[in-house]
Image (cartoon, rainbow, N blue to C red):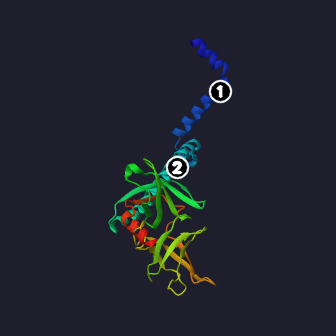
Amino acid sequence: MLRRVYEFIFNFKEYVVYSLCLCIAAVLLASNETPQIRSIRSLAVLSAGFFQDAISMIPNYFDLRRENQVLRELNLNLADEVNRLREARLENLRLHQILGLRERAEFRYVSAKVIGKTLQLMRNTITLNVGEADGIKPNMPVLSGDGLVGKVVGTSGHYAVAQVLYNRDLRVSAKVQRSRVDGIAAWEGGSRLVLKDVAKNLDVQTGDVVITSDYSTTFPAGIRLGIVSSAVPVEGLLFQRIEIVPGVDFHRLEEVFVITSTPDSTRIALEKRFGE
């Protein structure tokens, strides 16, 4: 053991001597109380403290990288939660608006979601997630909080297809709410409805609200159709061309209600009998 120590000291004698000299110098400096030595000690302590503070201010790269990753994940989770809350809020507002219809009418409603739609054809329809099992039948009116949507034209056990106002085959008996002028609302293409069979001398103005009339056997009276966007006399004819902006935005339509009432067959038969 002593031999190994001797060999180590002999092989590294320069480093051993240098280390001893440093130790002796440190002891002498620590035990010396002269003003010059005290100044050197104070300067050394201040320098060490300054460098330690400077080093401590340098950010740890790996800690910052880990913290940045955690913050990114937290931000992603928060953004996802905000989006889900926003969607739930918008759905709640839409349903609140639709459910307000229950307070204004005596009919029974069945709520439904739009699960399919075609809006690029001449006979546009929507598909609903309710059907015969929910009491849905053909010719039942469909509406939303913004007004009339259309009517059911076909059903299966759990699904229904409804014509919308943007359908060439759908006609609605309507009237101007302010002046009580009657007409037939229909779609001829584009983004507007047309109120037909309104004479030139009748009072219809831009901005008038158009609603369903009492003359309809399919739709209850008083359901909003839209707003008159223009009323122009047609040259050479006895009628006006009245265009209506629908209240319902069919491109954004997601929730609807089906009124579970069908046309009165006795009324239809009587009117048909004396109308021939």
Rendered position, 80 above or below 242: above
Residue located 63% across and 84% down the image: 236
- Point out residue 51 in the picture as x, y percentages from the top left corner: 58, 47
Few, some or many residues within 10 Å of mark 2 (<14, 14–19, 20+): few
Q: Nearer the viewer, residue 142 or 236?
A: 236
Rendered position, 30 above or below 198: above
Q: Are marks 1 and 2 in contact (CB under 8 Å)?
A: no
- In-image side of 89 versus 22 (left or right): left
Say which mark, if any, is on residue 93.
none
- Point out residue 56 in the picture as x, y percentages from the top left corner: 55, 46
Residue 25, located in which quarter of the rendered image?
A: top right
Residue denoted by label 1? 15
Q: What type is the residue that disc 2 sits on?
A: Leu
Q: Quarter of the image containing the N terminus?
A: top right
The tag earlier along the polypeptide, 1 or 2, is 1
- In-image side of 86 versus 242 (left or right): left
- Point out residue 72 in the picture as x, y percentages from the top left corner: 54, 48
Gap between marks 1 and 2 measured at Cα: 58 Å
Residue located 49% across and 72% down the image: 226
Rendered position, 22 above or below 189: above
Residue denoted by label 2? 76
Mark 1 vs mark 2: give the one in front: 2
Residue 177, located in which quarter of the rendered image?
A: bottom left
Q: What type is the residue that disc 1 sits on?
A: Tyr
Few, some or many residues within 10 Å of mark 1 (<14, 14–19, 20+): few
- Point out residue 46 in the picture as x, y percentages from the top left corner: 55, 49
